[in-house]
Amino acid sequence: MSDKISVLLSEEQVLTGILKAAEQINHDYAGKSIHLICVLKGSVFFTCELAKHLTIPVTMDFMTVSSYGDATESSGVVTIKKDLDESIEGRDVLIIEDIVDSGRTLSRLAAELETRNPSSLRLCTLLDKPERRVTDVTVDYVCFEIPDEFVVGFGLDSAQMYRNLPYIGVLEPEKSNTPQ
């Protein structure tokens, strides 16, 4: 694989954005506990880093929801592959997503979770690409708004690769030197 990755957000910038979101969440949920729902796999790095900086009581659960597979663009078909282990009824819930692109996945997930009667339901994302939105979804906490680039790192992948990068990078596939 000969992909080139250019840094969009450095590790320091990513951590600064997460700290800022954590500060706002701590303020908004003061005196309450919060139940984080980490959308696997991409959100795991973000969820863990965010949780470390929350000063309010936190519980956590995980879901696997997909509309991409190994593709670089959403298929538009959203599937829940792993559901929650615990009930969210009566709880203050915060869905943690790595990136909001078309909005389809988060919109469908939020609608599904609303039917389970949480006390409140808010959305948090590390990255937001509003220019790609095709479904109306309001995200309550956004660490970074980014341009329409295919990004990897800090949990985001390309065919399961690059999740472990400590920064957010733009994936730029190398052009073949073979004449076309």
Image (cartoon, rainbow, N blue to C red):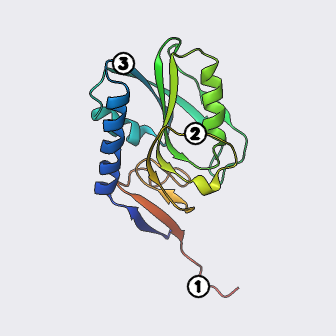
Question: 47 above or below 36?
Answer: below
Depth check: give the residue in front, 81 or 109: 109
Residue found at x 62% / y 50%: 70
Question: 85 above or below 125?
Answer: above
Identity, as a three-letter code, of the amino acid under mark 3: Ser
Question: Which mark lies nearer to you, 3 or 1?
Answer: 3
Secondary structure state at the residue bearing disc 3: loop
Horizontal arrangement in the rendering, residue 101 relative to residue 75 (left or right): left
Q: Quadrant of residue 113?
A: top right
Classify 10 Å Cα crowding around label 3: few (below 14), some (14-19), many (20 and above): some
Cβ atoms at labels 1 and 2 below 8 Å apart: no
Residue found at x 60% / y 29%: 110
Q: Which percent across, then down, holds residue 102?
A: 65, 48
Q: Which percent across, then down, holds residue 24?
A: 35, 36
Q: Which percent across, then down, holds residue 74?
A: 67, 49
Secondary structure state at the residue bearing disc 2: loop
Q: Which percent across, then down, holds residue 47?
A: 40, 36
Q: What residue is disc 3 on?
A: 33
The Cα–Cα distance between marks 3 and 2, rounded to whole angstroms, is 22 Å
Residue found at x 48% / y 50%: 127
The Cα–Cα distance between marks 1 and 2, rounded to whole angstroms, is 44 Å
Q: Earlier in the sequence, mark 3 or mark 1?
A: 3
Question: Which mark lies nearer to you, 3 or 2?
Answer: 2
Q: What residue is disc 1 on?
A: 177
Identity, as a three-letter code, of the amino acid under mark 1: Asn
Q: What residue is disc 2 on?
A: 138
Classify 10 Å Cα crowding around label 1: few (below 14), some (14-19), many (20 and above): few
The Cα–Cα distance between marks 3 and 1, rounded to whole angstroms, is 56 Å
Question: 103 above or below 51?
Answer: below
Identity, as a three-letter code, of the amino acid under mark 2: Thr
